Amino acid sequence: MARMAKTAQTAAPARKAHGVDADAKERNLKRLRRIEGQVRGLQKMVEDDRYCADILTQISSVHEALRGVGRELMRNHLKHCATVAIRSDPATAEAMYDELVELMHTHSR
Amino acid sequence: MARMAKTAQTAAPARKAHGVDADAKERNLKRLRRIEGQVRGLQKMVEDDRYCADILTQISSVHEALRGVGRELMRNHLKHCATVAIRSDPATAEAMYDELVELMHTHSR
Amino acid sequence: MARMAKTAQTAAPARKAHGVDADAKERNLKRLRRIEGQVRGLQKMVEDDRYCADILTQISSVHEALRGVGRELMRNHLKHCATVAIRSDPATAEAMYDELVELMHTHSR
Amino acid sequence: MARMAKTAQTAAPARKAHGVDADAKERNLKRLRRIEGQVRGLQKMVEDDRYCADILTQISSVHEALRGVGRELMRNHLKHCATVAIRSDPATAEAMYDELVELMHTHSR
């Protein structure tokens, strides 16, 4: 995955969003910085041999926080990228439906 | 949540695991350091207004990586903490069944 | 829930889809009839005191089958209902974005 | 899957639970009969071309009801089958840890 991310960031011309609401972007950056702190907290808990159930509960709250980011991104995606595609020609709209269904499915795992 | 974590780490005497396999611990620390890197990668993607679907895919792989940590912890929890409880008296065993069912339920969300 | 379903089916004029592809509808009815059979199979497994892990595996495949129905419905929803809303005025489009994000979130649990 | 279930029910000598609480069994049968009714309700909604979002919400409540069955089964599994294994020799206990971790992982999807 780290490798995939690298490829995506360096090799290919990275795909850009059609539009991003400034507020949503700020909220997501804030969430992600907090998530980074939570992940460092998890490392400390593992190092300290903390009770497994307590670590699992903390992991669960990182999942929840990530879902918050995903939710905001999905809304932005629908509002900007998806809307452009859906208002354009039928083939482009069809491709967008497929992408969205795929995203939701991946997302729901 | 940040607050909850703080309480758990400072106020109360933190609960410890009954036993932790050294290998499992090392694998989890390695996973968590990689996850920290992925979360920083996500911040950069958001800052660069990257295509929402690409960010969502990356989020999905952080969820998957976190599940790997949870899985390892759960195995350790069963092997050490749960086994001690289940081999002890019925009331302690019953409390452990409840904790485990609760954990799996939270975990499955 | 049974109560909620009843309310939806009897009290209020039930909301209709803006369009349904005949093929997708047929596939979903077929899936749902098979799911009904799986649920009856589960009842038999429980009655026969079958091994819990085997029943849990079977439950897992009912979840997967339901996700197949949800996926097909979501695609139809995007193609018909959502597209009508997104191509209409901004307020209607905004309401649809909210509904979709909500649906995906519920759906991912 | 229907095929798999058939194989499991007819060809092989079906594995049995080590013990089943009568109350838990009754609760699960009741839940499963209600779920069967919900699935038939879904068929009717699809036949009537009901609004996709309303069907998706109903599907979501079937998932939730199935999780209730899984939860009860898991508790029974821990209390009876898993406890027998964990109190027996180390190799049998180890095999049970693996089975449980696998079950929770499958279950969380």
Image (cartoon, coloured by chain):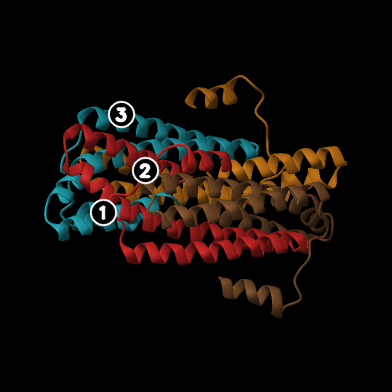
Chain colours: A orange, B cyan, C brown, D red
Residue designated by label 3: B27
Q: Secondary structure at mark 2?
A: loop
- Say if residue A50 shows up in the picture: no
Q: What kind of residue is marked 3?
A: Arg
Which numbered disc covers residue D79?
1
Q: Residue at x 50, y 22 (%)?
A: A3
Which is in the foreground here, disc 1 or disc 3? 1
Q: Nearer the viewer, residue C87 or D7?
A: D7
Instruction: Give the quarter of the figure containing the N terminus of chain D.
Output: top right
User: Which residue position is annotated with label 2?
Assistant: D15
Tell me if residue D59 comes above or below residue B67 in the rendering.
Answer: below
Residue at the (19%, 41%) spot, across then down: B80
Indicate the position of residue A17 as horizontal and vertical percent values.
68, 39
- Label 1 CA crowd tier, 10 Å (few <14, some 14–19, many 20+): many
Determine contact: label 1, label 3, CB under 8 Å.
no
**Depth-wise, is mark 2 or mark 1 nearer the camera?**
2
Residue D89 in which image quadrant: top left
**Label pair 3/2, CB-CB below 8 angstroms:** no
Toward the viewer: D19 or C102? D19
Residue at x 74%, y 43% (from the top left corner): A97
Mark 3 vs mark 2: tell me if same chain. no
Q: Residue B15 location in percent, x, y?
A: 18, 51
Q: How many marks?
A: 3
Query: Which callout, 2 or 1, points at the residue further toward the start of the chain?
Result: 2
Nearest the viewer among C74 and C101 is C74
The residues tagged by marks 3 and 2 sit, at their Cα atoms, a distance apart of 35 Å
Q: State the separation of the CA atoms marked 2 and 1.
A: 17 Å
